[in-house]
Image (spheres, rainbow, N blue to C red):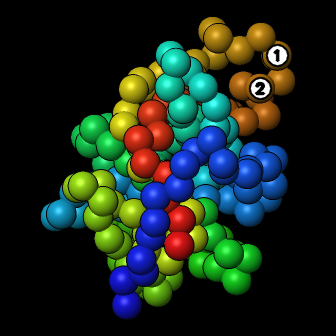
Amino acid sequence: MKHAFQPVDIDFAEFNPFLKIGKDWFLITAGDEEKVNTMTAGWGSAGVMWGKNCAFIVVRESRYTKEFLDKCDTFSIGFFEKNQHSALKYLGQVSGRDEDKIANARMSVEFYNGTPYIDESYIVCICKKLSATKLTPDQFIDGDIEKNWYANGDFHTMYIGEITCLMAR
Ligand SMILES: Cc1cc2nc3c(=O)[nH]c(=O)nc-3n(C[C@H](O)[C@H](O)[C@H](O)COP(=O)(O)O)c2cc1C
């Protein structure tokens, strides 16, 4: 059954990014009424850019979700209760190219003004894409970054999205 989400005033949001992003993880969801994809992310941040409240996400070239992010003007990020951790692990190991992973994870998609989100989230940020920047070796100052994280050349693109709606249930 569809959950009832309420808008939350972002000024009152309490959020530890190291825990919520780095340890609990989140889902990045993008697409349209025809096709939606989602993937687990454990890197990223939330903050302020160009005078707007923003989410910063990084997505490697190989991810199917990247095709949806590049095609769409908006995306969502969703945070989950601890009991969904194994589902998030699955959504971070399998590609939507290969299976209907949203259904297999027993999750469902809803839309907020045309932007898809995963209804089993307990907090959702609806984001409007502001920028997409490919992270390339010439930008890395720490010499270990390329060797440790990009030996296969599968670089990240950083998307900065304005959080246009924060909602919780
Ligand atoms: C805990 C965890 C965190 C992850 N964080 C990221 C991330 O921040 N960026 C990224 O590109 N991939 C990340 N991944 C990998 C993708 O979620 C994974 O490759 C996924 O299968 C991509 O699905 P897709 O091909 O359907 O887009 C993470 C995976 C896990 C399990």
Q: Left of 68 or right of it: where is 163?
A: right
Task: Tell me the residue at 49%/52% (across/down).
Answer: 166
Task: Tell me the residue at 53%/33% (across/down).
Answer: 54
x and y percentages locating residue 126 in the rendered image: 42, 49
* Residue 3 in view, yes or no: yes
| The image quarter in which residue 162 lies | top left
Q: Nearer the viewer, residue 20 or 59?
A: 20
| The image quarter in which residue 131 lies | top left
Establish if 47 lies above or below 68: above
x and y percentages locating residue 160 in the rendered image: 49, 30
Q: Quadrant of the N terminus?
A: bottom left
Task: Tell me the residue at 42%/77% (across/down).
Answer: 4
x and y percentages locating residue 3 in the rendered image: 42, 80
Give amino acid for label 2: Ile
Q: Left of 96 or right of it: where is 31?
A: left
Dot 1 falls on a residue whose secondary structure is loop
* Residue 22 in view, yes or no: no
Residues at circles 2 and 1 in contact by the CB criterion of under 8 Å:
yes
Disc 2: which residue: 145
Residue at far bottom of view: 1
Q: Nearer the viewer, residue 15 or 142?
A: 15
Residue 142's label in the rendered image is: 1
Give amino acid for label 1: Asp
Establish if 51 lies above or below 89: above
x and y percentages locating residue 143 in the rendered image: 82, 16
The local crowd at label 2, few if under 14, some if 14 to 19, many if 20 or more residues have their Cα within 10 Å, is few
The local crowd at label 1, few if under 14, some if 14 to 19, many if 20 or more residues have their Cα within 10 Å, is few
Dot 2 falls on a residue whose secondary structure is helix
Q: How many marks?
A: 2
Task: Tell me the residue at 64%/79% (across/down).
Answer: 84
Distance from disc 2 to disc 1, alpha carbons, whole Å, reads 6 Å
